Image (cartoon, rainbow, N blue to C red):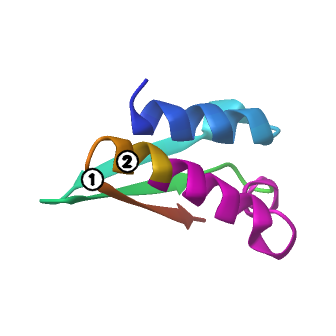
């Protein structure tokens, strides 16, 4: 499972409208940037209280990317 699929899987598990989850990958030299978009009303579920859920997702993504020798950054967009 690659990082994009991992982000999609986590996000779809959290939201009410999994069909509206969209992940876009932007590859740089050593850094991968992932843009996560969710349906209206689901943004709060992905971010969580005080950003805890988003922070946890970012930690998982960073750990998985480091295993591949890269850096990953997750941006959650409206």
Residue 7 in percent (x, y) is at: 54, 41
Q: Nearer the viewer, residue 18 or 55?
A: 55
> Horizontal placement of 35 versus 39: left or right?
left
Residue marked by disc 2: 65
Estimate how packed mark 2 is, as few (under 14), some (14 to 19) or many (20 or more) residues with alpha carbons within 10 Å: some
List the single residue furthest toward the top. Answer: 1
N-term mark: 1 or 2: 2
Principal secondary structure, stretch drawn in magenta? helix
Indicate whether residue 13 is drawn in magenta.
no
State the CA–CA distance, disc 1 to disc 2. Answer: 5 Å
Residue 11 in percent (x, y) is at: 66, 42
Question: From the viewer's perspective, is residue 39 above or below residue 17?
Answer: below
Indicate whether residue 54 is drawn in magenta.
yes
List the single residue furthest toward the bottom. Answer: 50
Quadrant into which the C terminus falls: bottom right
The residue under the point 44% across, 57% down is: 35
List the single residue furthest toward the right. Answer: 49
The residue under the point 63% across, 39% down is: 20
Callouts 1 and 2 close, C-beta under 8 Å: yes
Residue range corresponding to the magenta coloring: 42-62
Residue marked by disc 1: 70
């Amino acid at each position: 499972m690659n990082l994009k699929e991992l982000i999609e899987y986590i996000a779809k598990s959290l939201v009410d409208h999994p069909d509206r989850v969209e992940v876009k990958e932007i590859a740089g030299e050593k850094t991968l940037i992932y843009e996560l978009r969710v349906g209206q009303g689901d943004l709060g579920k992905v971010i969580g209280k005080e950003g805890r859920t988003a922070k946890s997702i970012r930690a998982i993504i960073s750990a998985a990317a480091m295993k591949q020798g890269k850096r990953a950054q997750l941006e959650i967009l409206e």
